[in-house]
Amino acid sequence: MADSQTTFPAFDKLPKVEGEPQGSIWGIFDKDGKKDECGTLNLLTPAVVRAAAREIQSGEHIQLDWPLHNVQFPGFGRKEFSQTKIDLNASLNFKAMDDELYINTQSGSQWDSLKHFAHQKTGRYYNGLTHEEATRSDTNGIHNWCERGGIVGRGVLVDWLAWYEEHKGSAPSPVSRHEILAEELDKALAWQGTKTQPGDILLIRSGYVRWHNNASEAERKKGTQENSIAIGLQGSEESVRWLYDHHFAAVAGDTVAFESWPPKLDEGWCLHEWLLVQWGSPIGEMWDLEKLSKVCKEKKRYTFFLTSAPLHVKGGIGSPPGAIAIF
C-alpha cells in the first residue's frame, strides 16, 4: 500500500512486526520518530487527489449517507437515533429553531476509526495501541483524518449485487452470513470494465440497503436487531491478500460490517483485524449505494471523485461519513 514515492514489498516479504501476523504494516508510515495514526489514508497524497479530480466531468453528485433515522432497529444493543426540535421563540423572543440529536455513531452509515476494533487475541489496535491505552487516550481517533483534510480521492464501486443477479440469478439474503469471494470481486470488476488503482476508495454493493429499504418493520427487527447476521466479504486469506495487493486507501460497503458477520475469529482472517488493526484502513459500513449503482450503470462508469468529511471529534471512534460521489 504505497504512494508514488514508496514501493511496498509483497505480502510475504513485509518486515515482520513482533507479536503480529505476517502482513502487518505497522511502522511503515511512521515519521520522525512519531507513530502514525492515519494508516492507509496516507495514500491519499496531493498527487492522488489531483488525479482523482479528473473524474469530475458532468458535475452530478450523490450523497452516500443513509438518513440518520434510517436504521429502525440498531443491532448490538445500540440506541436508536433521536431528534429534539427546540422552539427558541419562548426563551429568546426570536422566531427561530434549534435541534438536538442523539446518535450512536455505529448505528447507521459510518466510518470505523482505527480505535474501534482491536485484535481480539492481543488487545492491540493499529500501530500497537493497547486497549487500556485506547480507553484513556485520543490516539488513533477520527480527528486525525479531519486534521489531514478529511478523506478525498477516487471512489470505485464494485456492484457485486448487479453482477451476481446478471450471472447467477436471485441474490442471497443480505441478512444471512453469505460470504462474497474475492474472485467474485475480480469478475464483477471485469464485467464492469473497471480497473483499480493504488489509493482508490473501494465500495462494495451487496444488497443490504436495498433489502432494508423494502423490508417490513417485523423483517427489519428480526434481521438487524435480533440476529446480528449479515452478508459481506469473506474473511479469508484470499480476501486479505486481495485487499493488500490492491492497495486501497479505505474500504466501504452497504452492509453491517463490510465483511460477512459474525467473523470466524479463531481462523485468523477477521477483516476488521486486518483492515483496521494491521493496515490502518478505515472501514465504511451501511453506506447507501443504491442511487450510485443506478448512475454508474447509466454512465457505464464505476469510478468517481469521492469526498468524505467525518465528524471532527477528538479521539472519535465512529462517524457518519458525510460522503459524496461526484461524476
Image (cartoon, rainbow, N blue to C red):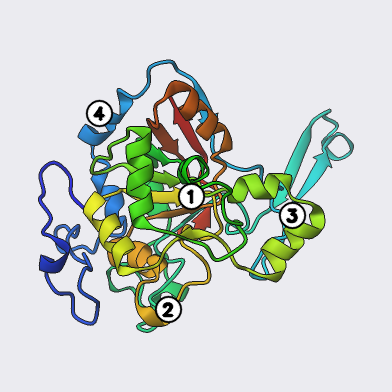
Q: Secondary structure at mark 4?
A: helix
N-terminal label among 2 and 4: 4
Task: Give the label on residue 265, or none.
Answer: 2
- Give percent across and percent down for residue 124: 35, 77
Name the residue that disc number 3 marks. Answer: 72
In percent of the image, x 25 and y 61: which residue is there? 241
Against 15, residue 314 (above or below) is: above
Name the residue that disc number 4 marks. Answer: 51
Three-letter amino acid code at the position of disc 4 = Ala
Three-letter amino acid code at the position of disc 3 = Gln
Three-letter amino acid code at the position of disc 2 = Leu
Q: Residues within 10 Å of mark 4 (few under 14, many from 20)?
A: few
Q: Residues within 10 Å of mark 2 (few under 14, many from 20)?
A: some
Front residue (pair 84, 230): 230
Q: Is residue 60 left or right of residue 87?
A: left
Q: CA distance from mark 2 to mark 1?
A: 21 Å
* Quarter in which the C terminus is drawn: top left
In percent of the image, x 43 and y 55: which residue is there? 283
N-terminal label among 4 and 1: 4
